[in-house]
Amino acid sequence: MTPAADEPLEAEGVLNPASGRGPDGGLYLLPRLVAAGNVSRVGLARVLIEDGVPVGVEREGVVLEPDRAFERGANNAGVEDPRITTVPALGLHVMTYVAYGPLGPRTAVAVSRDLRDWQRLGPVTFEYDDATGVDLGLFHNKDTVFFPEPVTAPDGTPSLAVLHRPVWDLEGVRPGEGEHPPEALAEKRPSIWIAFIPLDAVRADVRELTRWRANRFLAGPEFPFEELKIGAGPAPVRVPEGWLLLHHGVTGRLEPGIAQQQNVNYAAGAMILDADEPWRVLQRTPEPLLAAETEEERSGIVPNVVFPTAIERVDGVDWVFYGMADSKIGVARLERRNESGA
């Protein structure tokens, strides 16, 4: 998917899509549409498939705009980088997205039954845990996505699990404040965390989807392609080994206060989380599975970026949809290799 030349809402790119199956059984992308001034909306586009291969899209409009106060600031606005998890236990599509409001990027949640009409549940709040000594609500948070099936939380409660990625630098909120990582945390770089929400609480009140409990560190940067930070990608996929999680790793140089970085490299890796205890990482890739190699991935609003955000199965084949240089959307086939590498 590339920006339409005659569409002002796409003037600065189409990227980082969520995905889902509509009531008609069709496959849809919900891309981030970026207008002039880096103002983002969430669109809807039906995926065109030929011989089992996604080859294009048909646009069907906008489903979410930055029209709430928490999505708009004096100098910025946007609903960005949606991730959608279809949760059969709730009968809902659950969207996490970045609300770019008065204090910068914050995670928010919306739900839908048809991918078209979305009920906002509002910004996420985080339960305080004195063992970590940190108020997660103070910090910017991105790369959030729910698991598709209930799991058993560390306290034994049937729960929905969700991944998120706090950033400890408060400079953008209060100049001069600097970084405030939890003292008890060995890894200070932006890393993937996991949280839990009791399933019974959500069934009683869907707004509980915004109240994230039992937050804990899951995985931090470990390999060279993750030197600066990592973040979750699409919703985890259940595989025989556990949960498959695609993630991105970042290298290069980050410039303070710059939204559209120019000196970074984003690559995609993977890890396997334990099936029964998804807060435990069993395996991860020391090298990226996907890196910026093509012209579309190397040149754009933010060059040298591949950013996976959705996995969908078409005729028995898994396809990964990903942002290309913060400008376009690509698709790649996800294949399993045996132990010999074949």
Image (spheres, rainbow, N blue to C red):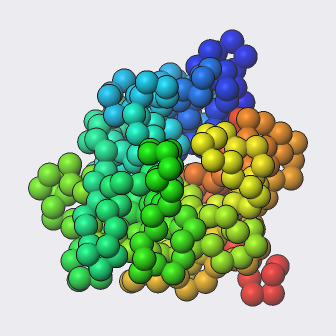
Asked if residue 295 lies left or right of residue 40, the reply is right
Up/down of 331 relative to 239, above or below: above
Point 21% across, 77% down: residue:
157
In this view, which residue lies farthest toward the left?
204
Asked if residue 252 lies left or right of residue 107, the reply is right
Residue 304 location (% of width, % of height): 79, 49
Can I make out residue 124 in this image?
yes
Residue 264 location (% of width, % of height): 75, 52
In this view, which residue lies farthest toward the front?
176
- Name which quarter of the figure residue 248 lies in: bottom right
| Number of numbered tags placed on the structure image | 0
In this view, which residue lies farthest toward the top?
6
Residue 120 location (% of width, % of height): 29, 37
Point 34% across, 68% down: residue:
134
Quadrant containing the C terminus in the rendered view: bottom right
Up/down of 212 relative to 30, above or below: below
Query: Along the line of sight, which residue is nearer the eye, 142 or 294?
Result: 142
Quadrant containing the N terminus in the rendered view: top right
Point 77% across, 58% down: residue:
252
Point 83% across, 39% down: residue:
299
Can I make out residue 329 in this image?
no
